[in-house]
Amino acid sequence: KQEVTQIPAALSVPEGENLVLNCSFTDSAIYNLQWFRQDPGKGLTSLLLIQSSQREQTSGRLNASLDKSSGRSTLYIAASQPGDSATYLCAVIEETSGSRLTFGEGTQLTVNP
Amino acid sequence: NAGVTQTPKFQVLKTGQSMTLQCAQDMNHEYMSWYRQDPGMGLRLIHYSVGAGITDQGEVPNGYNVSRSTTEDFPLRLLSAAPSQTSVYFCASSYSMRQGDIQYFGAGTRLSVL
């Protein structure tokens, strides 16, 4: 059974710092990996999607990498801002069950002014 | 476009009551799904649909029913609510489940069963 783990569970940083969030998964046979953002009391917003054949994706200050063979992904946030405060979730779609996302529990990020 | 719309936003039920959580999308997406989010458990898939008339079970389907009569709507029915079904429920949709398709989520329904 696929398991997705995110470390750390919570992170507090001062504004302006560069930071890395980690995601690992146990079964490397995945279609893609997605990073989501969830604000308190809100739904999930897709940030980046990395297909299994890709190594990284970038959007603005965000960069996500994927090492499928080792079962790892990182989300890099440059020059963090208080508005980046949220919970960040990663999720994978497996090759053998192409209709479902398996989520990690998320990293709760607080960026202090 | 409204995206994925879930109603109601909040609901309190008594044990044994039934209700339907509504989900609608206006993006002509084939794939729709329901997740529940619980502290310490993350998001878990309840049911999903790959198109009108086609549904299948996810990881935690017990106590829930779904149907997909139109492309736009995918309601989730609780037949006899139990306290264990207290959770936040999210509906999601995507054009398909191919490699490059982003999933769009609704704002959620917060359900308490007393």
Image (cartoon, rainbow, N blue to C red):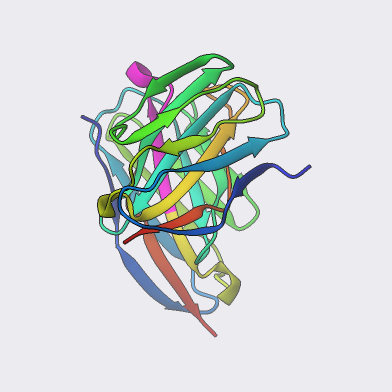
Q: Residue at x 50, y 22 (%)?
A: B49
Q: Residue furthest right?
A: B1
In the rendered image, residue B67, in percent from the top left (x then y), is placed at 50, 24
Could you tell whether A20 is left or right of B73 in the image? left
Asked whether residue A101 is in view, the answer is no
In the rendered image, residue B78, in percent from the top left (x then y), is placed at 40, 40
In the rendered image, residue A45, in percent from the top left (x then y), is placed at 57, 50
Q: Residue furthest bottom?
A: A113
In the image, residue A51 above or below residue A41: above
Could you tell whether B48 is left or right of B4 in the image? left
Q: Residue at x 57, y 33 (%)?
A: B93
What range of the chain is rendered magenta?
A: A89-101
Could you tell whether B15 is left or right of B72 in the image? left
Asked whether residue A29 is in view, the answer is yes
In the image, residue A91 above or below residue B11: above
Which image quadrant for residue B102? Answer: top right
Closest to the observer: A65 or A30?
Answer: A30
In the rendered image, residue A41, in percent from the top left (x then y), is placed at 51, 64
Which image quadrant for residue B100? Answer: top right
Q: Quadrant of the C terminus of chain B?
A: bottom left
In the image, residue A9 above or below residue B43: below
In the image, residue B102 above or below residue A82: above
